Image (cartoon, grey):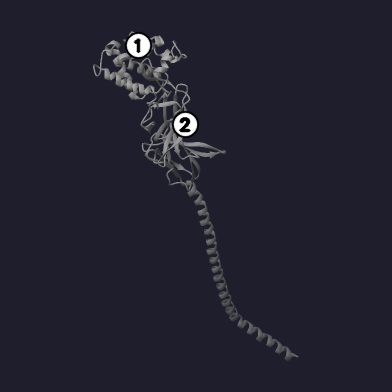
Amino acid sequence: MKTNLKNTVLTALIASVLVLGFLPMISTMTGQENHETYESLNEEKNEIYESMNEENNEIYESPNEENNEIYESPNEENNETYEIYGRKYLGEWDDDEWIYEEGLEGWNIILKQEENDDWVEIANTTTDEYGRYNFTDLSSGEYRVYEELKENWKQVYPTDPEYHSVSLPGGEGREYKFVNAEDYEIYGRKYLWEYQDGEWFYEEGLEGWNIILKQEENDDWVEIANTTTDEYGRYHFTDLSSGEYRVYEELKENWKQVYPTDPEYHSVSLPGGEGREYKFVNARNETPLTPGYWKTHSEYGPAGYDETWDEIGEYGEDTEFFLSEQSYIEVLWTPPRGGNAYYILAHAYIAAELNFLNGVYAPSEIRDAFDEATYLFEEYTPEEVGRWRGNQGQRQDFIELAGILDDFNNGHYHY
């Protein structure tokens, strides 16, 4: 038993020595391993840490970049300003279209923006010597550009609506133009052409006549307006643009247009032709009557009285006829015995004058013949002319003028 105990103790002692001898080695080995593992872990951690840091940095920087872009984008938009500009032109109508080149100075241009469902003026400016205008330092939004219309002008462009709608951004960089034309007027009067007290004249206006305004379109003159003369014979057309116009009258039955003739209309150029009266003169165009009618329709009969005799002079048919020492009606009833050229012409002359007074239109050749006859009656008596035979004196002048006036009285010059 002592031997077994001794062996056991010895075995334990050897084991202890062996264990103690190997511990440093184990420790060294384990330490190296642990150290390698630690370093490996540390390196891994560093890599992970750096990777995370890089990732975090990327994640951190990316939103910042995005945020910066998002942040800066509104700032850039908010900070960016825009301009609205344009020009005002003088419009002229030519060859069926508006042309414009010349700028208009001193016109007020208005800028509006919507506010509480209403468009409110936020700025205004005046066109320069070339017609130019501009509004600067404008932010994004919706705008309208208007012009302030002047008296006697009209807006040709834009129309319907008469303003420019501008969206910013998007609508910048283009010219917003206005085109205007002067508002012209053509006016005139219609007169009665009449014979009175030995003279032809026009003074009385004619009411209720249709006046027509035409303008050229596709090589044809087309009616664009019409109006009716007032109680004084006046008419006018307003709101007219520059261009070429013609003014006509609508002729009534049994009337003659005395003026204008050849052509029977007025040509008017605007501008240039404004500010003057374009008149029309008309004469009644009744049927002329012969000496036989007039001598039988006086107060002395035998036919009914024609009131035209009242206009021949203060005493009607009893008015003295020039140097004859006879009244008008007495001259008419005196036959031209012996071919007295005085009475031949006097009969035609008296009938012609009564026809004038009765509203028969007399063309210029009739008026001229009548005026020449008047001169002869102011110079000669029936006795003087009665002594002429053949071509003596001015007998042939009396005969020739009597023939012209007689043709008129018989309707050969009726228009």
On residue 321, the disc is 1
Q: Is residue 390 left or right of residue 202?
A: left
Residue kind at label 1, given as amino acid type: Phe
Residue farthest along the top direction in this orientation:
325
Residue 172 location, x and y as percent?
Answer: 45, 46
Of the 4 image quadrants, the one containing the N terminus is bottom right
As drawn, 341 above or below 94: above
Tag 2: Cα neighbours inside 10 Å, few (<14), some, or many (≥20)? some
Q: x%, y% of residue 274?
A: 38, 29
Does dot 1 land on a helix, a strand or a loop? Answer: loop
The alpha-carbon separation of the residues under discs 1 and 2 comes to 47 Å
Q: Position of residue 215 (x, y in %)?
A: 42, 36
Q: Quadrant of the C terminus?
A: top left
Q: Quadrant of residue 272?
A: top left
For the point 54% across and 59% down, the residue is 60
Closer-to-camera residue (382/177):
382
Q: Which mark is residue 61?
A: none
Disc 1 versus disc 2: nearer the observer: 1
Residues 390 and 76: in front is 390
Q: Can residue 67 be seen at all in this image of the molecule? A: yes
Residue 9: give x, y in percent of width and height: 70, 86
Q: Is residue 60 above or below residue 121?
A: below
- Residue kind at label 2, given as amino acid type: Asn
- Judge whether 45 appears above or below 211 on screen: below
Task: Find disc 2 in the rendering and name its residue.
Answer: 226
Kindly tell me whether residue 314 is visible in this rendering: no
